[in-house]
Image (spheres, rainbow, N blue to C red):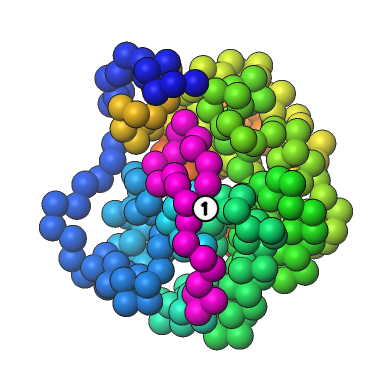
């Protein structure tokens, strides 16, 4: 679909969409930014234009994006650059582990661009990064937020063998919107991968997220929840899609805070161990405290 076809009228942001802008970054925010520069690490916080970057970096919370800053796909919602990536940086895992230790993180989220150009989709780099964090910051829990590794046989097993504490893969949107919003991906494959991750290691927490406002209906959202629960996914995140630029898919609707609260109740009723649903929810937002709650809830249920 062309950019002109994706473009639509720009809706005015409702009053509940509030992004804190930092006109003069200071303190911990600058320390976090400087550390990422010094260690030559990319973050999804910057590359994907996350609206929560000010709050998170002020608390020294980062989501590191490995395998470069150029993606081999061109999803209609994503602000990450598309093109031909560089080769794998084999020094990256050590620098990541050092950064996690220096920040003193209790929990770290490691994500990546899609690397369809690599035979393993980048799976071995994920494993090396998990191992580096375990070695250099043994008290830190590790969450991986992976691409779909589509057509990369054995890639999921490589990541699972590294034993992350949380295996996260976002389905992003309802299946009926995949062709327009997430070309190159398969909803069925993404759900099957989450199911397989739990089958490989039942002790790992599985997690997935979606955006609202791209044209989905409430019934489609509820059906997606059912699919994730059938795949034994523990944790679902639901947030409002915010258009990064006029080149990206238009926001077709802003869901109200009350609707997010109701969706949270719907998810609870379906048996998710953890639910985060609000307009500003993002996959890695408050991931550290959410992991502690997940762990406590599973312990209480056992």
The answer to whether residue 155 is magenta is: no
**Residue at point 56%, 50% (across, down):** 114
Where does residue 192 sit, x and y in percent of width and height? 79, 41
The answer to whether residue 84 is magenta is: yes
Where does residue 53 sit, x and y in percent of width and height? 34, 53
Q: Secondary structure at mark 1?
A: loop
Q: In this picture, which residue range is highlighted in magenta?
A: 72-93
Whether 197 is drawn above or below 233: the answer is below
In this view, the residue farthest toward the left is 24
For residue 251, side relative to residue 18 (left or right)? right
Where does residue 141 sit, x and y in percent of width and height? 60, 70
**Residue at point 55%, 85% (across, down):** 136
**Magenta region, main secondary structure:** loop
Q: Which quadrant of the structure image shows residue 3?
A: top left
**Residue at point 59%, 80% (across, down):** 132
Where does residue 152 sit, x and y in percent of width and height? 74, 52
Residue count near mark 1 (Cα–Cα under 10 Å), binned few <14, some 14–19, many ≥20: many
Along the viewing direction, whichever of 278 and 22 lies nearer the viewer = 22
Whether 5 is drawn above or below 17: the answer is above
Whether 219 is drawn above or below 50: the answer is above
Q: Is residue 12 visible?
A: yes
Q: Quadrant of the C terminus?
A: bottom right
Along the viewing direction, whichever of 113 and 227 lies nearer the viewer = 113
Q: Which quadrant of the structure image shows residue 61?
A: bottom left
For residue 129, side relative to residue 74 (left or right)? right
Along the viewing direction, whichever of 254 and 92 lies nearer the viewer = 92
Which residue lies under the disc numbered 1?
Answer: 113
The total of numbered circles placed on residues is 1
Q: Is residue 298 visible?
A: no
């Amino acid at each position: 679909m062309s950019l002109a076809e994706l473009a639509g009228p720009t809706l005015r942001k409702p009053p509940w969409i509030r992004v804190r802008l930092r006109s003069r970054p200071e303190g911990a925010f600058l320390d976090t930014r400087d550390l990422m520069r010094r260690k030559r690490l990319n973050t999804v916080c910057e590359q994907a234009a996350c609206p929560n970057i000010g709050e998170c970096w002020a608390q020294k919370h980062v989501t590191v994006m490995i395998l470069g800053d150029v993606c081999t796909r061109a999803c209609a919602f994503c602000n990450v650059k598309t093109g031909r990536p560089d080769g794998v940086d084999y020094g990256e895992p050590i620098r990541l582990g050092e950064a996690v230790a220096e920040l003193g993180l209790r929990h770290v989220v490691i994500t990546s661009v899609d690397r369809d150009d690599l035979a393993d989709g980048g799976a071995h780099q994920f494993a090396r990064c998990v191992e580096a964090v375990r070695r250099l910051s043994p008290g830190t829990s590790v969450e991986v937020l992976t691409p779909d590794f589509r057509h990369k046989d054995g890639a999921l097993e490589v990541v699972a063998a590294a034993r992350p504490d949380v295996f996260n893969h976002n389905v992003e949107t309802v299946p009926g919107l995949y062709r327009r919003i997430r070309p190159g991906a398969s909803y069925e494959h993404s759900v099957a991968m989450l199911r397989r991750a739990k089958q490989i290691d039942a002790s790992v927490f599985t997690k997935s997220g979606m955006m609202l406002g791209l044209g989905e209906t409430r019934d489609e959202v509820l059906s997606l929840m059912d699919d994730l629960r059938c795949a034994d996914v523990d944790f679902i995140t639901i947030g409002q899609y915010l258009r990064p630029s006029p080149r990206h898919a238009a926001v077709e609707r802003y869901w109200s805070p009350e609707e997010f609260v109701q969706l949270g109740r719907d998810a609870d009723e379906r048996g998710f161990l953890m639910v985060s649903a609000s307009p500003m929810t993002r996959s890695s937002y408050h991931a550290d405290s959410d992991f502690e709650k997940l762990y406590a809830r599973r312990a209480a249920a056992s």
